Image (cartoon, grey):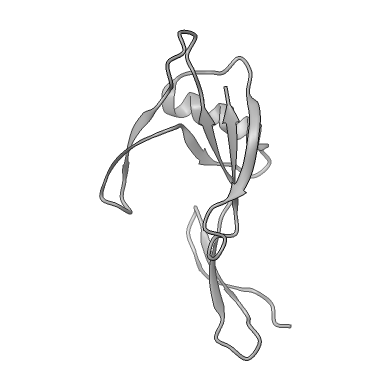
Amino acid sequence: MEAVTEVFKTEWFSIDAVPQKNQQPYYRLSCNDSVVTLALTADQQLINIRQYRPAIDGFMLEWPAGLVDDGETPAQAAQRELMEETGYRCDSLEFVGSFRVLPCRVKSSVHFFFG
């Protein structure tokens, strides 16, 4: 079987051509896994952020999230992203679970935490 070929690359993701038997290549998006943190303040307020998203040319109200850096665990990434995006730090983080977003095209997983 032919090897997967990277056909486009940015600092955040790449697009790979995955060979298919007797067909055109299948294209997938590859990137590091990501994390999302659902966090509460000491007075039980949910921490959200408002971010501009170029893909939709608009703002979204979201939970703190981001990519897992190379050499970093998902839990470390969740704490880092929460601090970077909100200035908050969790005393404890509980892993909720992982899933794949759009597995028909995207290779990575999303890891959810509660803090």
Which residue sits at x=53%, y=18%? 89
Residue 55 image position (x, y, % from top left):
33, 54
Image height check: is 98 above or below 42? below
Residue 62 image position (x, y, % from top left):
39, 35
Point out the residue furthest to the bottom here. Answer: 22
Which residue sits at x=44%, y=32%? 63
Which quadrant holds the C terminus? Answer: top right
Q: In the rendered view, does 68 fall on the left or right side of 53?
A: right
Which quadrant holds the N terminus? Answer: bottom right
Q: Quadrant of residue 72?
A: top right
Point out the residue furthest to the top here. Answer: 43
Return the residue nearer the eye: 72 or 24: 24
Q: In the rendered view, does 37 fall on the left or right side of 61?
A: right
Residue 107 image position (x, y, % from top left):
60, 59
Residue 66 image position (x, y, % from top left):
50, 40
Q: In the rendered view, does 70 fall on the left or right side of 82?
A: right
Which residue sits at x=43%, y=29%? 85
